[in-house]
Amino acid sequence: MVKRIIIVLVSGAAIYLVLPRVTAVFASLPRLSTLNWIWFVAAMAAETAHFGCDFALQRLALRTRGWFAVITAQLAGNAITNILPAGDAAGAAVQFRMLAASGIATDTAVGGLTAFSLLGVGGLLALPIFALPAILFGAPVRNGLVEAAFIGIAGFVLFAGFGVVVLATDRWLAWLGRTAQRLHNSVARRRRPVEDLERRLLRERDIIRSVLGRKWRDAVLLSAGRLAFDYLCLLAALRATGSHPRPSLVLLAYAVSGLIGLVPITPGGLGIIEATMSALLVLAGVHVGDALLATLAYRVASYWLPLVAGPVAYGLFRRRYRTTAGTG
């Protein structure tokens, strides 16, 4: 109960701090009718392609041929993540239970979802690298974007190094498992003690390594595709407002706002991403009004519409797997 109260308080404080910027973004709602609808449809199509890559990548990681359970579980889990404070764990739990109810093995589901998450984080951390040539050799870039880019690149280097150590060696991962187990059992004395965490981590690591080892080219292509289409959604939203900023600076603004969105302060980054992205787009040379409107259009495509699709997907899943889901 204390943990939940703290999470709610932190989320509320974060939203309060960015409230003026968020209010300005949502005040642009009536201006959605002024968008160039050809470009807005293009933004929606790009976001649809982004989710298509999402589904294909998760299907690859889960080593299944079916699409229905992967798509519905992903949409339902995404909706839970985006409506609950620090909802990542709850969304992942819902997705895991749905996949298990559809017949996907438990170990496969855990390893596949972990691999999917690692690929997503790694790809997002790598994005500032692609904007580096524009920073070094292009037109002048404002200091805020430059500093954020180098922080993102440093994060990618650390993440890549950690990934190599975890995937290539048993010793450090086993040590991490033993340490985490001792720490958890010493702090959470009233809960059931964690056992065999070292062995479970090694087993799940082996599943991740086998998934990425056989089809790593497909995994890299789909990871790049999901980020590229999401970025193109933002770029098309900007074009829909009549703005024509430098794509490299928009990429940098997109990458930094995505990295900030990884911190689970608010559900789905609600408020935080709106405030961050609109401010970074202004730094990228976009007019304030256009930045606010483009951010709203992008979030309609990437946040609000998938949020609405979540309950529909869950209902369809329950209808197909009624008996299994009801007993799980």
Image (tube, grey):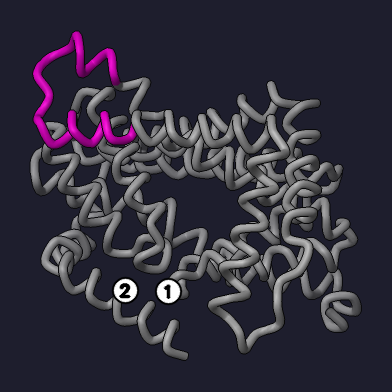
Inspect the image, locate mark 2, and give the three-letter code of the amino acid beneath it. Answer: Ser
Tell me if I can see residue 273 in this picture.
yes
Q: Position of residue 168 (x, y in %)?
A: 69, 30
Inspect the image, locate mark 1, and give the three-letter code of the amino acid beneath it. Answer: Pro
Q: Position of residue 257 (x, y in %)?
A: 30, 45
- Residue 72, above or below 262: below
Q: Is residue 125 left or right of residue 246?
A: right
Query: Which region shows up in magenta?
Result: 132-152
Q: Which mark is residue 85?
A: 1
Q: Which mark is residue 46?
A: none
Tell me if I can see residue 42 in this picture.
no
Q: Position of residue 38 (x, y in %)?
A: 36, 37
Residue drawn at x 26%, y 29% is 150
Q: Is residue 145 left or right of residue 274?
A: left
Disc 2: which residue: 11
Q: What SS does tag 1 mark?
A: loop
Q: CA distance from mark 1 to mark 2?
A: 7 Å
Whether residues under marks 1 and 2 lie with C-beta atoms below 8 angstroms apart, the answer is yes
